[in-house]
Structure formats: structure tokens, C-alpha cells
Amino acid sequence: MRLLVLDFLFKQQAAVSLNDLEAAFHRADRITLYRTLKTFEEKGLVHSIVDGTGSVKYARCEEGCECAPEDLHVHFHCNLCNETYCLPKARIPEIALPENFKTEEISLIMKGTCASCS
Amino acid sequence: MRLLVLDFLFKQQAAVSLNDLEAAFHRADRITLYRTLKTFEEKGLVHSIVDGTGSVKYARCEEGCECAPEDLHVHFHCNLCNETYCLPKARIPEIALPENFKTEEISLIMKGTCASCS
DNA sequence: TCTTTGCCTGCAACTGCATTGCAATGTTTA
DNA sequence: TAAACATTGCAATGCAGTTGCAGGCAAAGA
């Protein structure tokens, strides 16, 4: 079962929400899919994306992705097709912070129109 | 009533969630505060921040803030004190996107330890 | 082989936050 | 004063995420 989900995740271009998974595997229980995603996230197979749409999305981690600040890439949410994409090529540039601020995580989400919809 | 909320918002250093407001104004109804925030947001007095903690936070808009991409600043969420701050001095640098991607909004949230907690 | 142990799955239920409908109240305007 | 509109509060709903519990399946050990 998890293998099916993993396979599905790796075939996706866009990030996948729990609802997406549920629609794709309507034979499986919502809870099972939820826990599957959580397990994958723990194991570092996927990373979660909070894109402000209300539902958390998941996408596969690239080879060697540790989800550490220096590994983080940009996520793009298209307002037309409502999909969220990883943009691994767009790295987050260094950002100057006030003194004594220590960064552990960065999340950069751009919203607009993606290439397919424009 | 709204004046009280507005006054409260402008005195805050950190962004404010609905729960924060409810705690500060326990005489007022949660719904009233919710709609007050929504109204302020519509009028451009405050902007909302989705910092991934599950509850949306609100902060006052700076003079001339149109919440347009070029106006956007960084938000910082401290994992210790659990507060979210606006960092208007930390501008979001230009980010190179693949072709045909059009940006309308940018949200950059950094998480870590703030100056007060370190 | 039989039993035990542990993981995976599914049902039910709960939580927290956001949101809406409706009635009551207060305030402005004609 | 009466009508129109805005503001407030209560109740209820919706949705996403989360947890507890029990059954089932499979691997490990006697």
C-alpha cells in the first residue's frame, strides 16, 4: 500500500495534498494515507509545504535533500490551476537578519501564474 | 470596539492571532474580533501572515504598504517564544524564476530563535 | 508448527481554526 | 419618528489535522 503511494508521489510533477491522495486512492482510508505521508516525512522521503491554501502539501525530496536551510528551494503556487510546484533551481538567496536572530528553517512561497497556465 | 482593537494592534511588536485578541479582549466575542480583523485586512490596515503554526496572524501595515510583491518583507517566527515578527528591513531579494512564471505574491517566513530568546 | 510480537490498516471520534446565518442591538439619515 | 444600515453576539457548520482503539497481517522466535 505504501509502495503504491510512494510510487504515485514520485510520479507527480506538483505537490500533493491529502485530498489529492484520497482522490487517487479512493479505496484506501484517509487516515492510512495521512499516516503514510507522516511516515514518509519522518523518514525524509518527502517534505511538507504550507502554501497558505489551508491544506498541507507534500512533495518528494530530491537526492540528498536534508531539508536544511541551505537545501531549501522555492515553492510556487499557481492561482489558476491551484497546483504547487517545487522550483529546485530557484535557490533562496542569503537574507540579512537583525543581530541575534538565528535561522533554522526558511519557507519561501511565491504565488502567481505558472508556465502551463500563462 | 474596533477602535480598541485597532489601538491594540498598533501597540504590538509581534503579529497577533485571533486567540491573542480573544485573550486580550475576553469581554468581546470571538466572532466580532474575527470580523474586525477581516475588515481591517480589506481596508488595508493590517496584513495577514500564514506562518504555518495553524493560526493566521495579523500585523499592522506600514505607511504606504500595499502588500504588493515589491512591498513585501520577511516574517520571522520564533520557535521559543512562539511569536511572529515583521522584519521590514529585510527585503526579499529578486528571485530568478523559470520562463513564463508570473509572480503576484511572495511570502517568506523564517523560523528560528529571535533576538529576545537567544 | 504454533505462539508471540510488532507493524499496518480502518473505523470512530475529537480538536482547533475559520467561516456563515440569523437575530438583536445600536447608529445614522431622511 | 421611521427607515436604512452597520455592528455585535449566539449558534451552528465546515474543513483539515490528529488521536485512540481494535482487528488483521506478517515476521520472529520457541
Image (spheres, coloured by chain):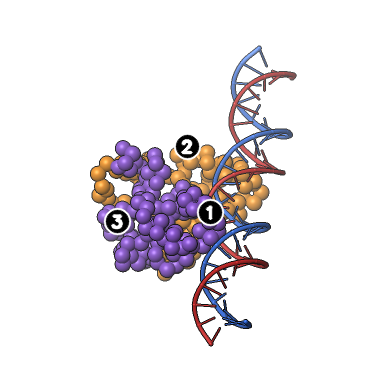
Chain colours: A orange, B purple, C red, D blue
Residue at image position (48%, 62%) is: B1
Q: Which residue is mark 2?
A: A43
Q: Are marks 2 and 3 in contact (CB under 8 Å)?
A: no
Q: As drawn, is D4 to the left or to the right of C3? A: left
For disc 1, the chain is: B
Q: Is residue B65 visible?
A: yes
- Choose between A55 and B116: the one closer to the eye: B116
Label 1 residue SS? loop
Q: Using the rendered view, name the quadrant where residue B65 is placed.
A: bottom left
Q: Amino acid at mark 1?
A: Arg
Q: Which residue is mark 1?
A: B27
Q: Which mark is residue B88?
A: 3
For disc 3, the chain is: B
Label 3 residue SS? strand
Q: Position of residue D18 (x, y in %)?
A: 56, 41
For disc 2, the chain is: A
Label 2 residue SS? helix
Distance between the Cα atoms at labels 1 and 2?
Answer: 46 Å
- Choose between C22 and A96: the one closer to the eye: C22
